[in-house]
Image (cartoon, grey):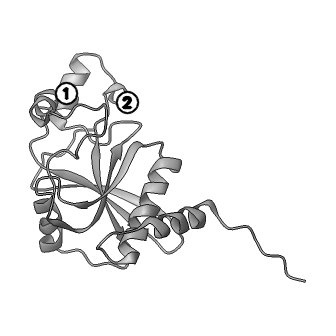
Amino acid sequence: MQVALPRSALSLYLDSTAEEDTSPHPQYHVQLAAQVLHNLQFQHDWTALRIHTHSPDAPHTLLPRPLVSGKPARRVYIHPDEQIELIKAGIKDEDAPSVREWVLPSHLAEKWSLRRFADVFDGISAYPPALEGEERDHEAMAKKDKWRQLKRLMLATVDDDSTVVYYVVHDGIVKPRQN
């Protein structure tokens, strides 16, 4: 007699998102985004997560694929010049306030080119749109984060075994951090 194994939390979550999905993107891109969102929420303690299908700058323009935005538990990236100022002020990297970040879900088998990354960067703003109760003024955010001069996102690469690896990708050349 075979006993059916209980379904995983991720399988149940993907099934629930499939029922409410009205995205114009292919189903596998939508489920990949949902899988990354689930990983960020339950493995990395991100909050205020959302899946975006349309550009925040041009609401009727479809993004090349669904993107996730959210607020990490800790700051994902600190500019080298900001790092120097934090050290001078006696502030540890982990005490720097986190900001909303873009996340680009992808599969390990996908081939990414500069053109494909450029298409994604063309569709996003420097900061993801704020959610209810968050600061909405991009100019005020830019004054707080004067080191963020380029758009950036985190490339979330998912393998077949559901492992997710994250890489910070900038839209341009950025001075490397000092360790």
Q: In the picture shown, does residue 34 fall above or below 170?
A: below
**Figure quadrant of the C terminus:** top left
Counting residues from the N terminus, which is met first, the one under dot 1 or under dot 2? 1
Side (left or right) of 134 relative to 125: right
Q: Residues within 10 Å of mark 1 (few under 14, many from 20)?
A: some
Q: Amino acid at mark 2?
A: Glu
Give the alpha-carbon distance from disc 1 to disc 2, as whole Å. 14 Å
Work out whether residue 80 or residue 36 is closer to the camera in this orientation and state it: 36
Q: Residues within 10 Å of mark 2 (few under 14, many from 20)?
A: few
Residue 67's spot in the image, x, y percent?
A: 29, 60
Q: Residue at x 36, y 25 (%)?
A: 95
Count all numbered tags in the image, as a single digit. Answer: 2
Work out whether residue 68 or residue 112 is closer to the camera in this orientation and state it: 68
For mark 2, what is the residue? 94
Q: Amino acid at mark 1?
A: Ile
Side (left or right) of 37 relative to 124: right
Q: In the drawing, what numbered circle is on residue 84?
A: 1
Q: Residue at x 58, y 67 (%)?
A: 11
Work out whether residue 101 or residue 34 is closer to the camera in this orientation and state it: 34
Q: In the drawing, what numbered circle is on residue 20?
A: none
Residue 3's spot in the image, x, y percent?
A: 84, 76
Q: In the picture shown, does residue 167 fall above or below 136?
A: below
